[in-house]
Image: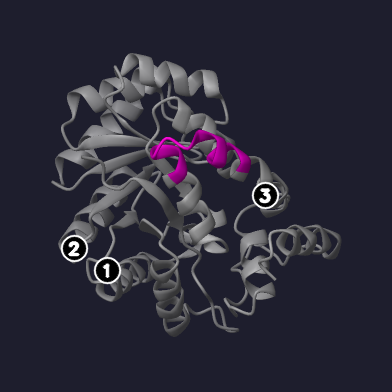
């Protein structure tokens, strides 16, 4: 059984003006997501600005989310690193804190070989007993997992159960499903490709858009999984301007701007990320208004 089916939110990390993590606001966001029928919380991923967190902040944020969610929906902790030992430590601590699973991005900057990726992921997974989801996002990491590598890991490591696929290459996704004989929990990592990936056997999405429209994303995936492909396809097509606006600058710059437009007061970004350019804010504002989010 999959860790979750539907739309899980790749949650932002709200910040105070002094750039400290705003845990009171995070508590509010978690409750709003659950009320909006989000199917899982993915904490401390790329959208959560984990790259600029200390290890202590990283784990404090994971523990906070687990404590506040209280088992109502799965909490999946982003514990990937370009250092295998660090990823092992974070993953073990997340399991001890009660995480339902971990999300493991490919090592960035190091650019491991395919054999290196197999060794990296196998080492991490063998140190924990909770499920692990691989995260393939070569546009950000400079490191792509080949479909054969993903298949090898899923077939040979019991608790590697799925992949968040954000390569943008649907042919790649089809190869993954073929090589895994469909025995993998496939999640879209791109909000504009959810329905196409569901059509190839996907079970859901790990979504940036869910930060601002959790029920919409939940309903889109649920419609598809219940067999209402026409409704899901229309929702996917209707969401494209919003998807484009939320990725017109590097994530999570636009989604934090969007949440602030909605009055959520999630604060600023940590350097080197900067505030959204004014002309792009106007594009985002129009897309948000067209979706009746503001």
Above-or-below relation of 84 to 74: above
Q: Which residue is mark 3?
A: 247
Residue position marked by numbered label 1 in the rendering? 66
Name the quarter where the C terminus is drawn.
bottom right
- Residue 124: % across, % down: 23, 41
Question: Which residue occupies 62% across, 67% down?
Answer: 256
Q: Quadrant of residue 236?
A: top right
Q: For the image shown, how many numbered marks are present on the structure?
A: 3
Mark 1 to mark 2 CA distance (whole Å): 7 Å
Give percent across and percent down for residue 223.
46, 44
Nearest to N terminus: mark 2 or mark 3:
2
Residue 174's label in the rendered image is none
Mark 1 burial class by Cα count in 10 Å: few <14, some 14-19, many 20+: many
Residue at (43, 84) in percent of width and height: 24
Q: Return the mark for residue 98.
A: 2
Instruction: Name the dominant secondary structure of the magenta segment.
Output: helix
Q: Please, what secondary structure does the residue beneath circle 2 have?
A: loop
**Nearest the eye: 43 or 230:** 230
Lateral position of residue 142 relative to residue 179, left or right: right
> Above or below — where is 106 with respect to 250?
above
SS type, badge 1? helix
Residue at image point 25% right, 27% down: 154
Q: Earlier in the sequence, mark 1 or mark 2?
A: 1
The first of marks 3 and 1 along the sequence is 1
Quadrant for residue 98, please give it: bottom left
Visible residue check, residue 135? no
Badge 1 vs badge 2, beta-carbon distance below 8 Å = yes
Give, as a single range, the part of the protein colored magenta. 223-234
């Amino acid at each position: 059984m999959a860790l979750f089916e539907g739309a899980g939110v790749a949650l932002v990390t709200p910040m105070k003006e002094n750039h400290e993590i705003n845990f009171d606001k995070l508590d509010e966001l978690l409750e709003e997501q659950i009320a909006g029928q989000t199917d899982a919380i993915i904490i401390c991923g790329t959208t959560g600005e984990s790259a600029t967190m200390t290890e202590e902040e990283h784990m404090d944020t994971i523990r906070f989310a687990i404590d506040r969610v209280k088992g109502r929906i799965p909490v999946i902790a982003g514990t990937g690193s370009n250092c295998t030992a660090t990823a092992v430590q974070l993953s073990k601590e997340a399991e001890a804190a009660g995480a339902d699973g971990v999300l493991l991005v490919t090592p960035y900057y190091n650019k491991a070989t395919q054999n290196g990726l197999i060794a990296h992921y196998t080492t991490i997974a063998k140190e924990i007993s909770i499920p692990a989801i691989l995260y393939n996002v070569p546009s950000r990491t400079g490191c792509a997992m080949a479909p054969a590598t993903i298949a090898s890991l899923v077939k040979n490591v019991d608790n590697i159960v799925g992949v968040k696929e954000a390569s943008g290459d649907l042919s790649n996704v089809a190869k993954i499903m073929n090589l895994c004989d469909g025995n993998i929990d496939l999640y879209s990592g791109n909000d504009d490709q959810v329905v196409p990936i569901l059509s190839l056997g996907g079970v859901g999405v790990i979504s940036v858009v869910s930060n601002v429209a959790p029920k919409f994303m939940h309903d889109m995936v649920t419609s598809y999984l219940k067999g209402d492909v026409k409704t899901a396809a229309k929702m996917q097509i209707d969401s494209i301007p919003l998807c484009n606006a939320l990725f017109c600058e590097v994530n999570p710059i636009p989604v934090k701007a969007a949440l602030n437009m909605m009055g959520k007061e999630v604060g600023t970004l940590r350097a080197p990320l900067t505030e959204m350019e004014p002309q792009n804010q106007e594009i985002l504002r129009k897309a948000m208004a067209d979706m009746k989010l503001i």
